[in-house]
Amino acid sequence: MTLMVYDAKICHSIQLEGGCKVARWRQPVIIWLRRVRKNSYWNHKPKGIKHPLAPPQIPWMSGSLYVAALVVAALVLWNIPNPSLVIPTLTKPSIPSRPSFVDKALAQASVSRDTFEAWLNQGIPLLGIVMNPNNFQVHWDAFLLTSLRMVTGVRLNSLDNILKAAIPVLGVVPARPPGLVQKSSPKNPLKVPRSKAQNAQEPTLPGDHHRIWAELGVSPTVGIYQTHSHESFWPYVPRGAVTAYSTQWTKTIVQVGWWLALDLHTMGVSVVQSRVDNMSEGLLASYNKSYYTAKQLLQWYPSVRLMIDLHRGPNTVTPARIQGTQVSRVVIVVGTNKLLPNAYWHQNLEVALKLSKALAKVAPGILVGKGVDVVPYRYNQQLMAGDLMVEVGGPNSTLSEERYAVRDLAQAMERLIKSDGLPKGP
């Protein structure tokens, strides 16, 4: 038995064990077995003549691709309807179908489908793009400014930054001589009078004469609001309740926010807390409403440099034991620009890392994990630099655990502010 190899250009032969002779060449094509006498074929084969028994060369790869293309074409053409069955109509054809589970649930709750879609559109990020693609808008200005900043390293959203980039010496010239304080005058008062909306009251709110906009100090540096204002804790909701939500503000995250504002003010930091009920229209619409609440806060209090959206964490959060006391754990959430534009997320992350570092020094063990959770959603953090979401405790926490936690959080924030760790401007 001899292993025979055929090709148009044969280079040489080598002798192998067992009496088999194998031809070696530059580009092998066909290999098969044929019973011949030893060296009989190679000694008598005329040059340039192809062996008559050589099998034909079949292009297997090309044939496989051709068959695959035919199969795909058949699958595509299979779903094309018969033109004779297409009937032009002037109205939307009615297709009889059974109502789905969602349709039955909406009918029992007396909720229209448009209202349900509006809830989903407001509550779930990016769902509105799927339900109504025409609502999607590209923020070209934020995209362009972010791209230019990444390339040039200069924030081109103010005249001061552009001049400092063009004339570097301006960066070392102070805007106002040190020690010079601008005096107030009747034509240019420093303090803007409060509007009637800022003086609105809710009798069940804690502190500051029950005002919805609690202002502690002049020209607040810290702004606090609660997107999920109904978040409460299991020990303080009625037995048998489905969710740990409540509108008794002294037992909700609003009370925790007031404690945080009170501690900051005691430490010498001016603060404003918005106690607007952002869940008045339900959970799904809360972020849409808190967006306008945060914008209103920045409009009324432009001196705010650190914005905190205070939340309660998930069920998995357990308290920490610090110096013999049960304390709720804290995590800082930073939204990025992976899904929607957010020109400030790098600055927010920098502030979050500084705040978590300060909090770890104030109360070691209070942080959940490493203390900072970076997520793809922006959670209304695109409004300013220094806009953070802070989660304190969870549904199983007690108000005493929350009280100790925000006291430590206030100390960390006070250290961050006094160390000039906040962004300088937009």
Image (cartoon, helix red, strand yellow):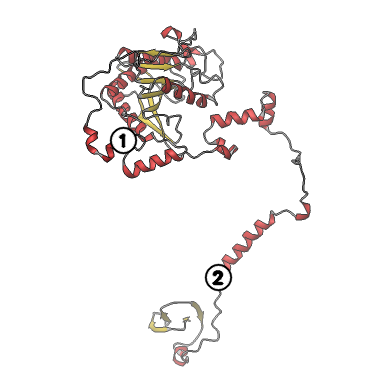
Mark closer to the chain start, 1 or 2: 2
Total labels: the figure holds 2
- Identity of the residue drawn at 36% across and 24% down: 306
Front one among 22 and 210: 210
- Identity of the residue drawn at 56% across and 37% down: 135
- Expressed as whole percent of the image width and height from the top left, the position of residue 91 reads 76, 41
- Identity of the residue drawn at 51% across and 86% down: 50
Q: Secondary structure at mark 1?
A: helix
Q: In which quadrant will I find the C terminus?
A: top left
Mark 1 vs mark 2, CA separation in Å:
66 Å
Residues tagged 1 and 2 counted as in contact (Cβ below 8 A): no
Q: Quadrant of residue 284?
A: top right
Q: Residues within 10 Å of mark 1 (few under 14, many from 20)?
A: some
Mark 1 or 2: in front is 1
Q: Residues within 10 Å of mark 2 (few under 14, many from 20)?
A: few
- Identity of the residue drawn at 54% across and 24% down: 283
Front one among 188 and 3: 188
Vertical order, 126 against 361 (above or below): below
- Expressed as whole percent of the image width and height from the top left, the position of residue 116 reads 62, 29
Judge from the rendering whether residue 334 lies leftward or rightward of residue 200; answer left or right.
Answer: left
Judge from the rendering whether residue 57 lies leftward or rightward of residue 188; answer left or right.
Answer: right
**Dot 2 corresponds to which residue?**
60
**Dot 1 corresponds to which residue?**
161
